[in-house]
Image: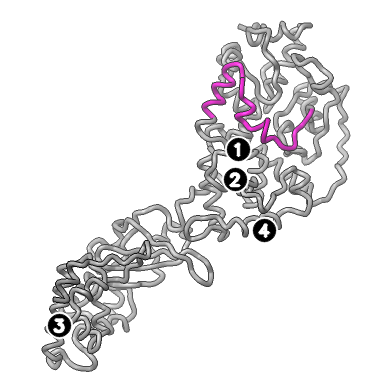
Amino acid sequence: MLPFFTNPYSNELVYSAIARYHFYSGNIDYKDTLEEVFHSRSVTPSVEIGSNFSILAQQLAPNHSLESLLSKHTIYPYYASFLSKSRKKEIIKDVQGDGQGLYSRLGMVAGGICKKNGLLYCPKCVTNDLEQYGEPYIHREHQLQGIVYCAHHELILKKYPIDFSTSSRIEFIRFDEKLMNLSMLHEVEPKEFITIQIALAKLAYQLLQLPIHNFCRESINFKYRTLLRERNLMTASNRIRQYELYNAFQSKFPKGFLEKCESAIVANDEYNWLKVITRKLKRHVHPFRHLLMLYFLEQDLDSFLQVEADTGPFGSGPWPCLNKAANHYKEYVIQEVNVTRDFKSKAPIGTFECSCGFIYARKGPDRLSEDKYRIGRIKAFGDAWKAKLRELEAEGTYSTRTLARMFGVDSKTVIKYLSSEIKIEGHSEKSIPSKLLIYRNQLLKGIRQYPSYSRTKIRLCFPKEYMYLYRHDNEWLFEQLPIIQREKNNQVIVDWDSRDRALK
């Protein structure tokens, strides 16, 4: 157990705390410090994260745990939100042990961008640290790849004059205020570049404050899709409009900015980082590019946390039946939704069909939970609706307007369906030809006998009745026939046994 330790300051790297420990312990040889802190003289210091955390946590218990050190005093949270759950488990094992493979799992080797070859600091932060603690220390938010401004004071970061290329590989570099330039002059570059870089720095700092298990690659992807759908950048079939996304993304940033940040997008590359970041792929995307994505989507971490995961333009089923004449009105009994695209607006159109025969559609995407109870257009009322209408009308106690309110339709719709039951081409039921009534009854009996038959099958089974009704009573005929079924594979399945019986 260590006799004392320099407890890390707010957002101080573990590396920085050990550097201060080495200084105050009076050790001359850095291997002595490694032996005291890690019980090993062969550990190689690492600025961003480190290794052998299980031993370090034991040394600092009960004030610090492995997870608290990792989440509060390394840059790991900058990467954690965009890693898969399995990758996170592997990294926890890495930092507990010798750290082999740690940085390749993070993507800092192959996928690193805007790499920093030294330690950086904010002059104003150093001034505040001197006033509060009497010494400066290495802030983790200033060491993040891609971040060049201080999120707190909006000043460009400066490089500490001593770096790893001029020091021993086992040396812990401690900030010395005598070697630091504390002038607060702003960098001369386009104002719009500065504005975006400061916004990205603030997003990065917010990332560091998140619990390391708050997000994962999978949940981030679903949140992105929700926000892209709101911007009409997803098709009705849940595909991302990559061409439109590319153009919108490019127009969000000033010319030359993405190139400066080593994040230019090659439009024709099937695996450019913008396509990879929006797909369910295992490829790693640098967290700085996720920050660019969040900036494009106009999100900070607080608002992004509130975004619901995308489950399609109409959410996940089941969906309610909105047939006011049914006993299961507003009950979630519809298991599937057929999504098509509006020809003009390209917005998704959802069609919901209940077993009671009621079919309705509405334009999406749904934005509120109440949208599930919204009807855009009724495509079919169904037998249950018609039977209930006839039943209430037969009681004689309801006016047409009252029935219309009860059924949620226009008065003309009520009149239309009541009239179709008792009139044909201006004739009363008593004056309907007997042949017509017979063929009506025969066709209705056949439809009830074969409820799964399509219109084509009904026509093949009852060709004589079908043709007579088509010529003399087609409005009634089409009201009774099943809804037109779309062929899924462009093949017509013929029931040859039924056709043979019909043609005998």
Q: Is residue 136 visible to the viewer in this orientation of the structure?
A: yes
Q: Position of residue 377 (x, y in %)?
A: 39, 72
Task: Give the residue number, with chain letter if any, for mark 1.
Answer: 284
Q: Secondary structure at mark 3?
A: helix
* Labelled disc at residue 439: 3
* Span highlighted in magenta in the image: 88-117
Query: Which is more N-terminal, label 1 or label 3?
Result: 1
Q: Is residue 132 left or right of residue 471?
A: right
Query: Which is more N-terminal, label 1 or label 2?
Result: 2
Does residue 306 show up magenta in the picture?
no
* Labelled disc at residue 247: 4
Q: Is residue 452 left or right of residue 254?
A: left
Say if 299 sits above or below 100 in the image: below
Front residue (pair 31, 339)? 339
* Labelled disc at residue 276: 2
Front residue (pair 28, 79)? 79
